[in-house]
Image (cartoon, rainbow, N blue to C red):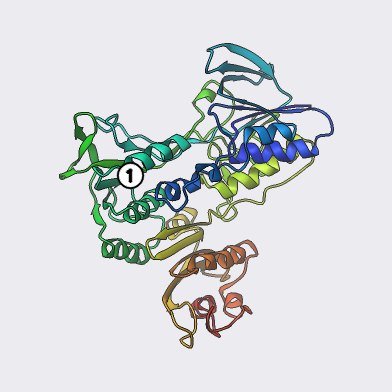
Amino acid sequence: MKIVIIGGAAAGMSAAAKARRLLKEGSVTIYERGEIISFGACGLPYYVGGFFDDSAKMVVRSVAQAKESGIEVFTGYQVLRINSAEKLLEVQNLQSGEIFHDSYDKLMIATGANAIMPPFKNNRLGNIFTLTKLEDGLGLKTAAAMESVQNVTVIGGGFIGIEVVETMIKLGKKVRIIERNERIFNRVFDERITALMQEELISHGVELTREESVSGFEGVDSVEAVVTDKGRYPTDLVVIATGFRPNTDFLEKSPVERLSNGAVIVNNSGETSVTDIYAAGDCATVPHIVKEEDVYIPLATGANKLGRVVGENMAGVEAYYPGSLGSACVKVMDYEAALTGISESDAVKMGVAYKTVFIKDKNHSEFYPGQEDLYIKLLYDATTGIILGGEVLGKDGAALRIDVISMAIKTKMTVKELGMMDFCYAPPFSKAWDALNVAGNVAK
């Protein structure tokens, strides 16, 4: 058995490690375009902000460690084309330029995604960054440390954009967010929750510019200003956080089926539309538990889990990924926000008759200092009361309450059952009736 994996990040390494442990005979080979593998990009904003200073902490497993475990790793190699009919790969050594062919019995596509760089005018000026790769983080950290960099502009009010904002505030910068929609996290979180997020950002000195579209940048060598359809904003540094695009252009002439954005479509076993070719990670879809369709959710959690499943299946051990709920969380200065399942816009598209409840409660008992507001939204089936989605906003560990809602969705729990769930209680952690109980009991 010859297993070849294209890409050595989260999904690729999870698959390689699992397959190598299971295979009694055969080889596991990784072709990685970059120079490092098993890299955790989620840590980049916090590395840039000085929350930790050793970039090696973001590398879960080194090339040497992978090789010691019996995995063949080739860094600096790019797969140019897949010939699925003959099970051949066209591979290029990026250093020498040499192009050669390799064969496979089972193939995995784990090429990840690239940050979207919109066609802004002068987008190649200095001090304009995206943040997905280690070299991005190294460059941004160096630039942000310069005394001349005082004004920072973040384009995009999504997860990475907001994480970068906290980083720059910690570094003492004056920060502006430019968001083309009417609110940050547009159509992701409930309007009441995003309103509280925006108030929190503004209270920390962030200038929030909404409903403006960036057209380009001004400057000689480095960026000096951001130009939008409504104004011009002086800046010393720009971080563009406008989303991701799956890195699958090399599949353009391949029979492997993809979504319109390029994401490879896979089933619950990680199989693509082509026999013996699998995919996982930010280049691929995941099956959604509630929507019951293939969706693009580029998160490390799904990448690692589906990658492990792919590794088992390629090694001949049948495995099944139950699906994703898109559970995600983000820190917005002193707030923590999290969501899981489907949103109201999702429910409308699906034609689901639904109800919602939104409550403001407290994170723990008044008998203990530090009591804070806690906001919870539940979305549930109007007929059965089965929970389909949820959002949480609060402080001091609030985000982890979303894990309860995630489990409730997976087990098809009703709001009535949530209202009577036996959660632990002590004054420092909750109230006798936890806020989740309250949300379930308020739901009608």
Residue that numbered label 1 is attached to: 145
**Residue 339: x %, y % from top left:** 48, 60
Q: Within the image, what quadrant is residue 20 found in? A: top right
Tell me the SS state at disc 1.
loop
Front residue of this view, candidates 146 and 16: 146
* 280 lies left or right of 54: right
Farthest residue, direction bottom:
367
Picture quarter containing residue 21? top right
Question: Looking at the image, how many numbered discs can be counted on the residues?
Answer: 1
The quarter of the image holding the N terminus is top right
Q: Nearer the viewer, residue 84 or 185?
A: 185
Is 333 situated left or right of 73 in this image?
Answer: left
Residue 437: x and y, percent? 54, 79
Q: Residues within 10 Å of mark 1 (few under 14, many from 20)?
A: some
What's the amino acid at mark 1?
Ala
Q: Is residue 80 above or below residue 186?
A: above
Q: Nearer the viewer, residue 203 or 195?
A: 203
User: Measuring 53% from the left and 40% from the top, which residue is drawn there?
Assistant: 282
Q: Is residue 410 left or right of residue 319?
A: left
Identified at 40% across, 65% down, the residue is 335
Q: Quadrant of residue 217?
A: top left
The percent coordinates of residue 175 (x first, y second) are: 27, 52
Q: Is residue 78 above or below residue 425?
A: above
Tell me residue 88's x, y (percent): 66, 17
- In percent of the image, x 34 and y 41: which residue is there? 240
